[in-house]
Structures are given as structure tokens and as C-alpha cells.
Amino acid sequence: MKSTLLPYTCRVATMADDDSASSEFATEFSRYLDENPSERERLHESLQVFAQNALRISSGLESTIATFAKASAQWVEQWQAATHELLPAFAKIGEMLDRALPSNMPRNPSPALEALEEVLETDGIPIIHVPRAEIVREILYATSFDDRLKIIETRQSDIAEDCALALADKDFASLAGQAPLAKRAVEAFRDGHYESAQALSIAVCDTYLKSYLFTKTGYKKMAKEVKLKEDDEAPAAFAFNFLYALAPVASFLTEWHPGDEPLTKLSRHVSIHFASTDHFSQVHATLSLMLVTSMTVAIDWAERFVK
């Protein structure tokens, strides 16, 4: 049943901003309650219930806040204690990761895996073992493939020097037939014979693929095998120093035929079967030095790692 109080409560809302009207309403409402004791009693009971509920809610909130504050303090204390205990473990993990990374990888911060994989696999730019960390950082922070090529073109002399240093003073015993050729490719480049450097580097890389890594595998399957896999369970050091060094091979083995769109990335297929002055360029020659040096050091590293 609808309460007879409704008309009065509605008038409160409409007269709240009018002092005289509010006073008049209060007088009229008081008289109404005097004339209707049952409504007055009902209102009294309602106000009592409201007051009791308000007190209960207030008491509950205080209890809840007190409980939450106590739990928060305990949680913070436990978290601080656990963190203090784990700090040595975190430091050890950091040291292990630092040792796992190739010496030319930037530190503090270390490169994001997504950026590293994009440069290696998507762009086909070798940056494992060479060049120096400073150049690797520039390449990783560049926002496009074209920008990365410009960096390589600008820093080609420094990159060639880094390749020479990486190949110097090492016997590469298991690669005795190829490592000297890789060194001569670097020498040819530094003497200004870019096309010769590129041709020799690519020939050595092709030998590595067919004679050391995939002796009975076709090029299409090789390209799939060298792609980085999310579920790879190889040790971090082996992954970074060897598997990541092979990742650019996926792009390197891209097939090309006359009539196809020109390739802007270093290509074994174009270099060997469709040689032209367009593809035999200083930038591609620099990339070929980076690839042959990276693969030479990586294969030698993997053999030492396995032993």
C-alpha cells in the first residue's frame, strides 16, 4: 500500500532551496503528524531502523578497514622479507644471463627479445658476435629496415674492423678450410674490393650450410630449420651464441627469379645465380661480412660448447 507520506517527501525535494517554503512545510508536516499518530509512529520506527543500520555499517567499515590495514602491513612485511631473501638469487640469474649473451650484445639494458628477433630473422641482419655493442644498439633502436641499412652503410668501416678483430688470433681448427677465406673476404672489403668480398663471403656461408649444418637438407628446409622457435628448450647460452647467429639465414636463403620484386636484403640465390651490380653493393657486401663472421664464430663456439 502506498504511504500517505509520499506527497510530503516529494515537496521536500521541490522546496529544498526555498527557506520560507521549507519553514511552511515543516509546520504543516508537524501538524500532519500530530493529526496522524500512526504515521508519526511509522516514521519514528523507520528513523530508528535507519540509525541502527548506519551504526552497523559504520562499525563494519571500521572493522573492515582495520582488518585490511593489518593484512596490508603483514603482506608488505612478508614481501620485503621474501624480496630480501630472493635478491641474491635474482642477482645470480642476472649474472648467468649476462654470461649467456654474446660479448657484443648491449647491456644495461639488454636488448628486448622481440627487437632482437625482428632484426635477425625478419630483416636478416646478422648482429651476433659482431659488430660492436654500440652499433648493435643503434641497429636495434632503429625503427625500420631502411634506417638499419643506413646505419650499416654509415658504419661499414667500423663493422669491417670488428669482423677482422673477431676472426683474428683464432685458429678455428674445425673450420681450417673456410675461416682463412672469411678473413680474406674482410681484407678484400677493407681494400675496397666490395664485390669480391661479397662473393667470397657468400661462398663460405654456403659451404657452412651444406657441409657443417645441413649436410643432406635442401635450401627450403634449411630456411625453415633456422627460424627461431618459441618452444625451443636449448640452453640460453647456446641459443644466443649459436641459434640466433643462424636466424638471418632464413632471409639469406630467400629465392628470387627474374620478374620478381627486387630484393633489398642480402640473398644467396641472387648473388650466385643472378649476379648484378644492383645486388653486389657496399651495403650487401657489409652484410655478407657480418654473416660470414657471425657464422664462423658461432660454429666454432658451438663446437667448444658441446665439448
Image (tube, grey):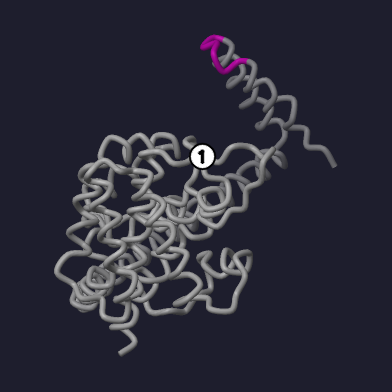
Which image quadrant is residue 294 in? bottom left
Q: Looking at this view, is 271 or 139 the one in front?
A: 271
Q: Is residue 227 above or below residue 268?
A: below
The answer to which image quadrant residue 295 occupies is bottom left
Q: Is residue 232 above or below residue 192?
A: below
**Which residue sits at x=62%, y=53%?**
255
Pick out the residue farthest to the right. Answer: 1
Name the foreground residue: 140 vs 190: 190
Residue 291 x, y percent position in the rendering = 38, 57
Tell whether 53 sits left or right of 234: right
The quadrant the C terminus occupies is bottom left
- Residue on which the image places disc 1: 276
**Is residue 16 located in the magenta-colored stretch of the structure?**
yes
- Over which residues does the magenta segment extend? 15-20
Residue 52 in view in this figure: no
| Residue occupying the point 41% across, 52% down | 199
Q: Secondary structure at mark 1?
A: loop
Give the residue furthest to the bottom.
307
Image height check: is 85 above or below 164? below
Q: Is residue 16 visible?
A: yes
Q: Is residue 162 part of the magenta span, yes or no?
A: no
